[in-house]
Amino acid sequence: MTLRLLHSADWQIGRIYSQFEPDDAAALFEARFTAVERLAVLAREHSADAVLVAGDVFDAQTVSDKTIRRLFNALSGFAGAWVMLPGNHDAALAESVWTRALRLGVVPSNVITCLEPGVRIVASRFAVLPAPLMQRHTYGDLTEWFSSASTPEGLPRIGLAHGCVQGVLPDELDSANPIAANRAFVAGLDYLALGDWHGSRRLDERTWYAGTPETDRFRANDSGQALLVDVAEPGATPEVQVLQTGRYRWRQLDARLAVSSDVDEIVRTLAETGPDEVLQLRVSGVCDLNGQERLRQTVEAARARLRALVFESHELRLEPTDEDISSLRADGYVGEALAQLRTEQTGDEADKAREALVILARILNGRSSAPVAAITETGV
């Protein structure tokens, strides 16, 4: 009988999104619980034998007791086995988020917490070989013991690990924890379920990263997914299907301004955004005062429409045209101040000069002196 597993990882429950406004940060915080509830529904609908969670269930050891309780409540939609592995964010320390959860008595009976290495038989259907992180960073391969581990004949061998597969992934990962690229082969695994890389990724026919079920960063890496894995029998090549789980779409938009039509393009692009998008907009180049005002208004309108917006403009240089300055009808001391601010945009106080120039232009135009944070913030 085919073994069916739902493979997920990197839930990062309790993550705080400090780069966003409070209401947006709260919505993204909640979305991680919703993603877990969605996984439970998918596991039930697809008649999975178990859900594998390959590390970083929690974002930090210090998450609140309420957050711990909410996480385990979110599992209620699937009555089958949940097999959970500590990762680098929630390592199985002597005192950890896992020991707190056990003391609180909130871990359901169908949840298997793999706080130590050792073969576990799950529902008499398969053997799982977990490699829990027992500290945040390790420099030896914790999956090495898989190769010598014996498991009952006739049961699929499933590896569960969290870390960086050597020689395959980019260097800028959250942890150094190494995993041999050929681990599934040398350990005779039918499937190796990995976490730490936040996007879904196939490394070989038996080795996959599931990625986070709810996108949490601007890197384009096929996140917001889970993997449905079918193993027909021990030794058979697993069939892996990607399932969409995430709600919010994160993306970056980089724009370099040179002429007024470049602002038009940003206006058109932002007009097409929707409420389930998280956008990082970075603008650079040069812009006149009229274009800057249009950009400001467009960004503020998009900020109210999108789920979240990070706007970076510290590399945008304001270059008022003669027409801009003439329309401001500034003379005497005010005219001299405008001229000085225009030249100071290339100095050490460029950001302050740009902000002052914007404020002065609005005052002279009779516009409201609304906050200019949208034009000067740097984001992440």
Image: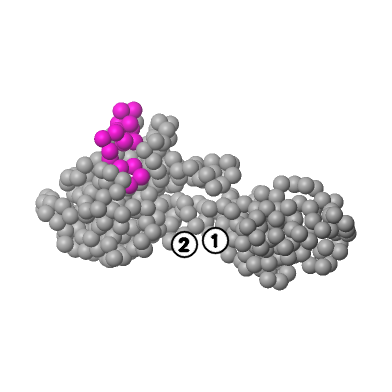
Secondary structure beneath dot 1 equals strand
- For the point 62% across and 62% down, the residue is 315
Residue 316 in the image: state x and y as whole percent.
65, 62
Q: Quadrant of residue 23?
A: top right
Quote the CA–CA distance across marks 2 and 1: 9 Å
Disc 2 + disc 1, Cβ < 8 Å: yes
Residue 48 in the image: state x and y as whole percent.
31, 50
User: Does any portion of residue 231 appear in the rendered image?
Assistant: no
- For the point 39% across and 59% down, the residue is 172
Q: Residue furthest top?
A: 104
The answer to if 86 sits in the magenta stretch is yes
Task: Return the mark for residue 214.
Answer: none
- Segment tinted magenta in the rendering: 83-104
Residue 174 horizontal side relative to residue 363, left or right: left
The answer to if 181 sits in the magenta stretch is no
Residue 141 in the image: state x and y as whole percent.
22, 54
Task: Return the mark for residue 220.
Answer: 2
Task: Determine which residue is flagged by label 1.
Answer: 252
Q: Amino acid at mark 2?
A: Ala
